[in-house]
Image (cartoon, rainbow, N blue to C red):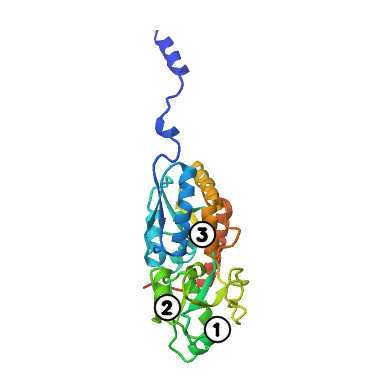
Amino acid sequence: MLRLLFLLLAAAPAPTFAWAQAPFPTRPITVINPTAAGASTDILIRAMAPALSTRLGQPVVVVNREGGSSSLGTAAVARAAPDGYTLLFGAAYSLSVLPTIRSDTGYTAASLEPVCQAFVNTMVVAVRPDSPFASLADYIARARQGGVTFGHQGVASIPHLAMVELGQVAGVALQDIPYRGDPPVVVDTLAGRVDAGAMVLGSLRGQNLRPLAVFGAARNPSLPEVPTVREAGWDVAPESFGGLFAPAGLPLPIRATLAAACEAGVADPGYREAARRGFQPAELYLGPDDFKARLQADIAAKARLLGGMTLER
C-alpha cells in the first residue's frame, strides 16, 4: 500500500502557484519624472502615458520628483523593487554624469537598467528678445569683461556642462545660476535676472526667447536660421538622450513587455506630435540592448571628460 501511494505521489504533477503565473502588469504603474512639471521630459512622458496604459492594460501614473539635478527622482526608482511597477523617465546623464561627480546621489550607474530610448535632446543658449547680445559671439565677448550669467536646469545637467565646456573652450568665466528644471530658467531669463538661459531646445516652444545658438553637429531643422555653437567658432556639441529605466534586476519577460509598450508609445501619434513640438529628431526609439550600449558608451565618454571633476553643492 505504501509503495502504491509513493508511486502515485511521484507521478502527480508538481504544484503550481498563482503568483508564478500572474501576468504583468496587474496593477497601476508609476513613472517618476525627475524634473519639474512643464519641463521637456515631463511633456513627453505625459504624452506617452496614455499609449503605455492602452498597451499595458493598466493606468500609468506620472509623478514629478524633481531636485538634486534629477538625482532625487532617480534615486527613488533605484531603491524601488525591480518588478516593473516603478519606472524612471529621465536622461542618461543621471547615470553617466551624476554618480561620477557626486557622492550623495544614493545610486550608481549599475542601479538602473535601460528599457528603451524615447528622446534625444538638443541644448540651446537663449536670451530675452531685447537682450543686447545679438549673437553668441556678443555674449562671449561680454564675458571677457566679466560678470555675465546664465541659468540652467541644475548642477551637472547637460545644459550646465555644455556651458562649462563652452567657457573652457572660449577661455572665459561664465557665472552659472542653477534652478530646478527649465521652466524657472525660462522665467528668469525673460525677466532679465540672468543674462542667458541654457536649456533643452524643446523648452523654447511657446516662449518669447531668442535663441543665440544650438549645441549640435548641425542646425536644427525646426530652427534653420539659428547657428550651431560650432559655427560660432567653438567646438562644443554635447548629446543628451534618455527614456525609460527600471531598477536593476528587472526580469527579462517584464523588460520585454515594457520595451514593446514603449516602442508603441514612441510611435503613437500623440507622442510623435509632442516630440515634433519639442524639436525632437525623427528617429527616437532604441530597444533595451541598443539603449544599454549607447548608455555604456556615454558613461565611458563622460568619465574621460569629467575625470576628477566635482560639482557638489
| Residue marked by disc 2 | 190
Residue 140 position within the rendered picture, expressed as x and y whole percent measured from the top left: 52, 86
Residue type pointed to by label 3: Ala
- In terms of secondary structure, where does tag 3 sit? helix
Residue 94 position within the rendered picture, expressed as x and y whole percent measured from the top left: 45, 63
Q: Are marks 2 and 1 in contact (CB under 8 Å)?
A: no
Residue type pointed to by label 2: Leu
Residue type pointed to by label 1: Ser
- In terms of secondary structure, where does tag 1 sit? loop
**First of labels 2, 1 by sequence position:** 1
| Residue marked by disc 1 | 135
Q: Say left or right for 37 vs 287.
A: left
Residue 6 position within the rendered picture, expressed as x and y whole percent measured from the top left: 42, 14
* Residue 274 marker: 3
Query: Disc 2 versus disc 1: distance between alpha carbons?
Result: 17 Å
Position of the C terminus by quadrant:
bottom left
Image position of 95 with respect to 210: above or below:
above
Image position of 103 with respect to 266: above or below:
below
Dot 1 crowding, Cα within 10 Å, few <14, some 14–19, many 20+: many
Please name the residue shown 44% across and 70% down the image: 156
- State the residue in front, 59 or 88: 59
Instruction: Please state which of the two labelled residues, at mark 2 or mark 1, is closer to the viewer.
Output: 2
* Residue 146 marker: none
Q: Quadrant of residue 1?
A: top left
Query: Disc 1 versus disc 3: distance between alpha carbons?
Result: 29 Å
- Residue 180 in sight here: yes
Residue lying at the far top in this picture: please name it.
1
**First of labels 1, 3 by sequence position:** 1
Residue lying at the far bottom in this picture: please name it.
145
